[in-house]
Amino acid sequence: MEITAEPYGFDLRPGGVALLIIDMQRDFLEPGGFGAMLGNDVSQLRRTIAPNQRLLAAWRAAGLPVIHTREGHRPDLSDLPPAKKIRGRGKTTIGDPGPMGRILVRGQAGHDIIPELAPLPQEPVIDKPGKGAFFATDLHAILHNLGISQLVVTGVTTEVCVNTTVREANDRGFDCLVVADCCGSYFPEFHRMGLEMIKAQGGIFGWVASLDAVLAGLSSAIILQGAAE
Ligand code: TIU
């Protein structure tokens, strides 16, 4: 089923596609976490919550696989590169205590996915130490085992973890469709350009579509699949 997208239609195959939701964590979307620590206005990202809820509900209703990611580090910080720890020269850095627990540390409240998009028990959650979801994780193996070759990607931030992950996925042979209104940045300009970069040059890393286009395509694909069974 073709989804209206840029730079051209995306041929969604319900048997081989997963929804990949990137880093919708309290540390990025709520005050007092990693995003705020970097000097950002977290309210910029909160407009992505409702669209992600709509897509997630439709995706789950269609019975298709969902995978969530979280950026963060081991409590002993042994997987935190020293360069990442000191980046930004902030007074408070990764691993330090904050209002939602230790910043960007696994097991702390701030590291959790926001309650609005809480994973279901059968939905894999990928804990990643970097910006890309493939580096130092088992995401590639999980996608291989599920027979997935297409990813519908959402989350935050558009130009950092979403872009890095789409680039990693593209190099590994996955077709990625990024849902524009389900992604967000602390910088509206970077959001816009982050999407432009993906779809420029004939779709150099992937495709970009609106939420409405994905929901329309999803419902048609499910109806067709149901008719074929
Ligand atoms: N700072 C910023 O824009 N993003 C990150 O640090 N991580 C993710 O994008 N998840």
Image: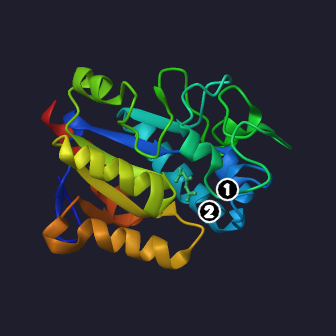
Q: Is mark 1 within 8 Å of ligand 1?
A: yes
Q: What residue do we see at 67% from left, 43% from top?
A: 114
Residue 101, position as x, y percentages in the image:
81, 35
The disc labelled 2 sits on which kind of residue?
Answer: Leu
Residue 111, position as x, y percentages in the image:
67, 37
Q: Which residue is mark 2?
A: 45
Task: Kindly report which numbered mark, 1 or 2, lies closer to the viewer in this rendering.
Answer: 1
Q: Which of the two residues, 181 or 95, is positioned nearer the viewer here?
A: 95
Residues under numbered marks 1 and 2 in contact, where contact means CB atoms less than 8 Å apart: yes
Q: Which of the two residues, 88 or 203, is positioned nearer the viewer here?
A: 88
**Quarter of image, res 228:** top left
Describe residue 9's horizontal placement relative to residue 223 as left or right. Answer: left
Residue 138, position as x, y percentages in the image:
36, 24
Vertical placement of 177 versus 27: above or below? below
Residue 5 seen in this snapshot: no
Q: Which residue is mark 1?
A: 35
